Image (cartoon, grey):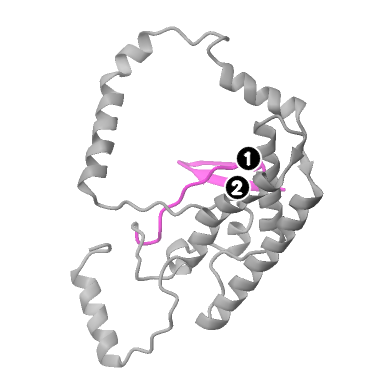
Amino acid sequence: QTISIAKAGITTVLNSRTSVLAAANPPSGRYDDLKTAQDNIDLQTTILSRFDLIFIVKDIRMYSQDKIIASHIIKVHASAGATLGENRASKEENWLKRYIQYCRTQCYPRLSESASTMLQNNYVKIRQDMRQQANETGEAAAIPITVRQLEAIVRLSEALAKMKLSHVATEENVQEAIRLFTVSTMDAARSGIHQQVNLTPEIAQAETQIKRRIGIGN
């Protein structure tokens, strides 16, 4: 399959066999915790289901965190001149790049029988939890859990085994892959307010006025 990209006046079509890393802003420009994940993400489920991991990154206003980020940005700009003057790293220093290339070409792990059973049970449980959540809220999840997500966890498990040059993906690799999937895609699917609240016309009008006067996140 292919994926079309239009950015800065350039329109092109890329082969989707490559890895795709995408970033997007919410429709309002800032993530609104008072809205559901579906309203904040506002992308078709057919697109979201194609990504292995989906992370929601919020710009939380914290003094300590803002200070660390500002300090890092300043150091990056301050050391820009010194970095340009340095020579490119030698092949001996690019050990990580060479190690990744070696893993890709020499190691092709597959799931063990016990790991496959664990993965199957966890996938069924995740599907049941999402079905129960949909029944309770009356809304479908923003990110559907389908066979594509199962394949994503399989890819993650095999990639974790490949990093260790193992030819077998074990239960430990499956557990870590499920953990990564849980803290990313599953948290994104559950984010926002899911409870259905019946608002009277007066309360709905008051809510509209409050939203006009108070910025998102305040």
Residue 41, compared with residue 52, is above or below; it is below
Q: Is residue 17 visible?
A: no
Above or below, 164 against 56 in this view is: above
Give the tally of numbered discs.
Answer: 2
Q: In which quarter of the image is residue 159?
A: top right
Residue drawn where x is 40% and y is 61% of the image: 27
| Residue type at the position of mark 1 | Ser
Q: Does the magenta stretch include residue 100?
A: no
Residue 134 place in picture, x, y as percent: 56, 77
Residue span colored magenta: 1-28
Q: Which residue lies furthest to the right in this view?
A: 113
196 or 18, nearer to the observer: 196
> Is 138 placed left or right of 200 in the picture?
right
**Up/down of 97 relative to 55, above or below:** above
Residue 81's spot in the image, x, y percent? 30, 14
Q: Quadrant of the C terminus?
A: bottom left
Mark 1 surroundings: few (<14), some (14-19) or many (≥20) residues within 10 A: few
Q: Which of marks 1 and 2 is nearer the N terminus?
A: 1
Q: Residue at x 71, y 56 (%)?
A: 119
Query: Which residue is depicted at the point 73% across and 33% down?
Result: 166
Residue at mark 2: 176
Mark 2 residue type: Glu
- Tell me the element at label 1: loop
Q: In which quarter of the image is residue 21?
A: top right
Asked if residue 108 can be seen in this view, the reply is: yes
Task: Report the Cα–Cα distance between label 1 and label 2.
Answer: 21 Å
Looking at the image, which is closer to me, 16 or 190? 190
Q: Which residue is labeled 1 in the image? A: 19
Q: Residue 84 carries which label?
A: none
Describe the element under mark 2 as helix, strand or loop: helix
